[in-house]
Amino acid sequence: MERQSVVVNSRKYDGEIRRTWTCELVANDDGLIILEGVFERDVSHPQLGNIERGTRSVEYFWPNRWYNIFKFHTPQGDLRNWYCNVNMPPSFINGTLDYVDLDIDIVVWPDMSFAILDRDEFEENAQTFTYPLEISQNVEKAVAELLSMIENRRFPFDPA
């Protein structure tokens, strides 16, 4: 199968694009979209430190789930970390994957230790954008599901 180029748009709740990048479609079946990308430049991240150019990102999106999971590998191929975004379920139309990022993230290290990030940002944006109760409920369910997946080493949290 020839890989298809995919544009990914991470949006704010008001629809404004927060970040955009290009990946390749690896798989799209059984309710799971897998993309793969490579960092084209070094990126400095407040919680993750320096992400080297050449870091490979395998990105897992489910059209019916309120999160996505990125698995980062160093340019040398070693597992760097996982990064989970809590978001509204994505749409995937004509080679573009769009999702609304709801700010809460979870970083998971190779030793399976983890940290929940940006709850304060979620709370601020919940007020700014007047999130309906359904969003807050789905965010909490997503965080609980992710923590269960991490603690039970369920796909894609398999360190091997």
Image (cartoon, rainbow, N blue to C red):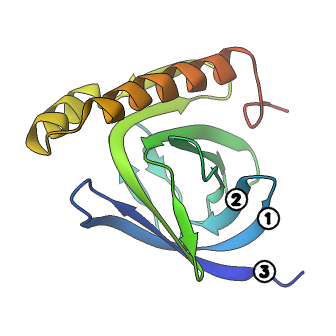
The residue shown at (73%, 53%) is 32
In the picture, measured across the screen, residue 25 lies left or right of residue 129, that is: right
For residue 139, what is the image quadrant? top left
Label 1, on which residue? 27
| Alpha-carbon span between mark 3 and mark 2 | 13 Å
- Name which quarter of the figure residue 93 lies in: bottom right
Which callout, 3 or 1, points to the residue nearer the camera? 1
User: Crowding at label 3, few (<14), some or many (≥20) Cα neighbours within 10 Å?
Assistant: few
Q: Quadrant of the C terminus?
A: top right
3 vs 2, front mark: 2
* Quadrant of the frame with the N terminus: bottom right
Look at the numbered disc 1 and give the secondary structure of its residue.
strand
Label number found at residue 33? 2
Quote the CA–CA distance across marks 3 and 1: 9 Å
Specify the label residue 6 is tagged with. none
Task: Give me the C-alpha separation between circle 1 and circle 2.
Answer: 6 Å
Amino acid type at circle 2 is Ile
Q: Who is closer to the viewer here, 60 or 91?
A: 91
Residue 15 visible in image: yes
Q: Residue at x 63, y 67 (%)?
A: 37
In the figure, 104 relative to 37: above or below? above
Q: Are marks 1 and 2 in contact (CB under 8 Å)?
A: yes
Residue 124 x, y percent position in the rendering:
14, 34
- At label 1, which amino acid type do we have? Ala
Residue 49 screen position, x and y as percent: 42, 42
Q: Nearer the viewer, residue 137 or 4?
A: 137
Q: Is residue 45 visible?
A: no
- Mark 3 — residue? 3
Considering only vertical position in the picture, is 112 above or below 46? above
Q: Residues within 10 Å of mark 2 (few under 14, many from 20)?
A: some
